[in-house]
Amino acid sequence: MKKFLIFSLLGIMFSSNAYSNKIYNGTFIDAHSQAGPLITDEQVSKQINNNDVDLTLLSVRGKYINANQRYKSIQRLTGTKTRYLIPTKLAGFTQKWRPVEKVISVISILQEQAINNNINYTGFGEIIVQHAPHNHSRLKYEGINNDLNSERISRAIQIVLNDDKPVILHVELNDYEKDSKKILNQLVELSKKYPNNNFLLMHMAQIEFSEAKFVINKTNNIHFITSHADNDTQEKIKKNKGKSQQGWINLFDKNDNFQKRWLDLMNENPKRFVLALDNVWDGHWLIGYGNKIYMWRKALAALDKNSSMLIACGNANTYFKLGIKCLKDRVK
């Protein structure tokens, strides 16, 4: 039995994937995560401090009146390992019945408070354009389906552009498949309208491979954030079938390596992808966080060295103007 286990482990270690036992050891930026209302500042800070992510760009969830103070609390505990993303979706932004003036004013209030509290924020959190319904014990939500030309979305985008920050957009092309062509065309129009600004699509926008190639070919300044496009999310989809959205795509094969077509696309267009994990709930932070970091470090090692450094650090460093040094190989 012991011999069988030893040979089994060796078989895993020396699998047919040449890069399976290599790890990307360069600077690792999580370009978008969130501190949700079900986890404490101390718990989030402990996870950030004790795991192998060099910098986390962090937004917060919950009551907007506490947002800036909550980030300051986390920053005191994490030091240089976090930067602030001003929340854009608090005060019912994603509730259709909430007045546009109210939800837009809250973004401006949070921005002003950050400035007055000497918080050197690096950008704004995701702007929810589309979000599928949820009937989960932790999230009851009827869903929302805006487009990029709707008033609340265009006004939120303008606040970010006026501050010369990258715009993070949350669109769901699979969960709202009937509107995917419209959204894709609006993204191309947005790119042409603001050619000197960068737009980042959360969760890969649930984009299919052919659609990703379309966006890359038609635009220069629309990029993909990699969060929740992995096997871990696919397992959650199976577990929560009928309770939450099902449209997330998967960049990985069953062995936690990049699918070859996505690997090739990333190597061909390394400036178009930005690494992020988008932890939100206590389960994201407290269960499997270290394993997900390892999965991404392992996958990044399969990319060309320049590609892996850009996706893991360089692109976020450029688009958010972080002013840090991205290392291809850190000395521990």
Image (cartoon, rainbow, N blue to C red):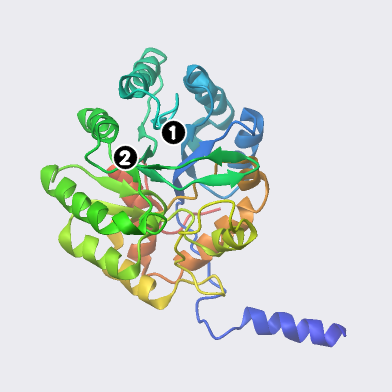
Q: Position of residue 327 (x, y in %)?
A: 40, 53
Which sits in the foreground, 164 or 154?
A: 154
Instruction: Name the residue located 26 percent from the left edge and 46 percent from the top edge.
Output: 199
| Residue beneath disc 2 | 320
Q: Determine contact: label 2, label 1, CB under 8 Å.
A: yes
Is residue 213 toward the left or the right of residue 329 in the image? Answer: left
Q: Residues within 10 Å of mark 2 (few under 14, many from 20)?
A: some
Q: Position of residue 295 (x, y in %)?
A: 56, 63
Q: Secondary structure at mark 2?
A: loop
The quadrant in which the N terminus is found is: bottom right
Which mark, by number, is residue 83? Answer: 1
Q: Which residue reaches farthest right?
A: 1
Instruction: Name the residue located 58 percent from the left edge and 45 percent from the top edge.
Output: 135
Instruction: Name the residue located 46 percent from the left edge and 51 percent from the top edge.
Output: 28
Which sits in the foreground, 85 or 297?
A: 85
Q: Position of residue 242 (x, y in %)?
A: 58, 56
Which mark, by number, is residue 154? Answer: none
Is residue 311 toward the left or the right of residue 257 in the image? Answer: left
Image quadrant of residue 329?
bottom left
Mark nearer the N terminus (2 vs 1): 1
At label 2, the amino acid type is: Phe
Is residue 216 toward the left or the right of residue 252 in the image? Answer: left
Q: Secondary structure at mark 1?
A: strand
In this view of the protein, can residue 229 be seen by the observer? yes
How far apart marks 2 and 1 lie (CA) works out to: 10 Å
Q: Position of residue 191 (x, y in %)?
A: 17, 48
At label 1, the amino acid type is: Arg
Q: Is residue 319 above or below residue 93?
A: below
Which sits in the foreground, 281 or 54?
A: 281
Q: Is residue 261 above or below residue 215?
A: below
Label total for image: 2
Instruction: Name the residue located 14 percent from the left edge and 42 percent from the top edge.
Output: 194
